[in-house]
Image (tube, rainbow, N blue to C red):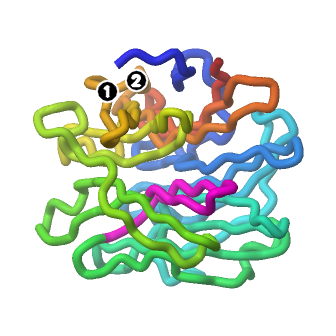
């Protein structure tokens, strides 16, 4: 599948938030990025290895140039009774306030839910109003929302993990949700699923909207359960009948587990884009990195 659109690449990417430690399982990333009134904002997950805390917090940071970020506030998993955090989504509300969606792990299970925090300022988010927006149930865990708001309303692509087969909860599909207000969501079923026998046979998780016409998405995929947490980035394009995935990944890290995942795209006013992504480094940790494209 050929495209003229810019794609994320590891080459020449710069670290914006280093991993919290020098070991596998130490990750900074799973970021949601946006550009608002000339300021770049990042909401990212800080994770420690299994047995040392997993996803311990979500940090919201700001930057004037898209590369040098200053933390503004931090939300901790304990405040939500969550065993772990994963990818957040940061959105500016139509009224000028802020909303932070959080991926929360249910303790002692493989279940996840998505909860929103609302506040007038970024600094006030940790004490903001809370709303469970996608609860999941005994059959599915829901996490890693990608949220867009435009003139037509709100859209969310969320990663769904089936819980019906013990030991195989790592499997991933992506469901589309829509909303009038970003709090009450209606599901429209699976829009991206793994392709048996290919590089994404175990999971397909939408991570970013690259273009609208036609709808072009970046997504995380992996072939095996053993590749969990080490996803690489693929491309899917709507052909009018549904999303069609490219036959091979479009981006991976050259280091350790090869992960290059959780891409977020900021469309720049002068043209081109800035990518943010989580990528593996030689010691097995994951840094949050950025690179210009286009």
Residue 136 makes an appearance in the image? yes
Residue 226 makes an appearance in the image? no
Residue under numbered circle 2:
250
The image quadrant that residue 194 belongs to is top left
- Give the crowd class for mark 2: few <14, some 14-19, many >=20 residues within 10 Å: some
Q: Do the numbered discs 2 and 1 sit on residues whose CB atoms are within 8 Å?
A: yes
- x, y (%) of residue 145? 50, 59
Q: Residue at x 31, y 26 (%)?
A: 246
Q: Which residue sits furthest front?
A: 240
User: Which residues, given as a range, are shown in magenta?
Assistant: 141-157
Does residue 72 appear left or right of residue 264 in this picture? right
- Does residue 218 sit above or below 250 in this rendering? below
Is residue 148 one of those drawn in magenta? Answer: yes
- x, y (%) of residue 289? 61, 33
Q: Foreground: 182 or 99?
A: 182
Q: Quadrant of the N terminus?
A: top left
Residue under numbered circle 1:
246
- Does residue 289 sit above or below 138 in this rendering? above
- x, y (%) of residue 83? 43, 74
Q: Residue at x 58, y 41 (%)?
A: 264
Q: Secondary structure at mark 1?
A: loop
Q: CA distance from mark 2 to mark 1?
A: 8 Å
Q: Number of callouts in the render?
A: 2
- Does residue 81 sit above or below 230 in this rendering? below
The image quadrant that residue 117 belongs to is bottom right
Q: Residue at x 74, y 81 (%)?
A: 127
Dominant secondary structure of the residues highlighted in magenta in the image: strand
- Give the crowd class for mark 1: few <14, some 14-19, many >=20 residues within 10 Å: few
Does residue 168 appear left or right of residue 68 in this picture? left
Q: Residue at x 40, y 15 (%)?
A: 2
The image quadrant that residue 255 belongs to is top left
Q: Foreground: 44 or 268?
A: 268
């Amino acid at each position: 599948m050929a495209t003229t659109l810019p794609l994320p690449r590891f080459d020449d990417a710069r670290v914006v938030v280093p991993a919290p430690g020098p070991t596998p399982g130490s990750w900074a990333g799973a970021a949601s990025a946006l550009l608002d009134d000339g300021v770049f904002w990042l909401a990212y997950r800080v994770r420690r290895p299994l047995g040392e805390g997993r996803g311990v917090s979500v940090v919201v940071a700001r930057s004037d140039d898209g590369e040098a970020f200053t933390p503004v506030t931090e939300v901790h998993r304990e405040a939500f009774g969550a065993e772990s955090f994963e990818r957040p989504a940061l959105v500016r509300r139509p009224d000028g306030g802020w909303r932070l969606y959080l991926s929360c792990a249910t303790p002692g299970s493989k279940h996840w839910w998505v909860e929103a925090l609302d506040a007038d300022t970024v600094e006030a988010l940790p004490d903001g109003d809370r709303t469970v927006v996608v609860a999941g149930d005994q059959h599915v865990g829901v996490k890693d929302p990608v949220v867009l708001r435009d003139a037509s309303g709100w859209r969310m692509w969320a990663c769904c993990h089936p819980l019906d087969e013990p030991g195989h909860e790592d499997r991933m599909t992506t469901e589309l949700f829509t909303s009038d207000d970003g709090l009450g969501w209606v599901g429209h079923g699976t829009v991206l699923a793994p392709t048996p026998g290919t590089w994404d046979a175990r999971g397909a998780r939408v991570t970013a909207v690259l273009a609208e016409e036609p709808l072009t998405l970046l997504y995380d995929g992996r072939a095996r359960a053993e590749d969990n947490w080490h996803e690489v980035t693929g491309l899917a394009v709507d052909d009018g009948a549904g999303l069609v995935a490219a036959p091979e990944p479009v981006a991976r890290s050259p280091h350790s587990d090869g992960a290059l995942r959780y891409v977020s795209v900021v469309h720049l006013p002068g043209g081109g884009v800035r990518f943010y992504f989580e990528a593996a480094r030689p010691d097995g940790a994951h840094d949050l990195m950025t690179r210009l494209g286009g």
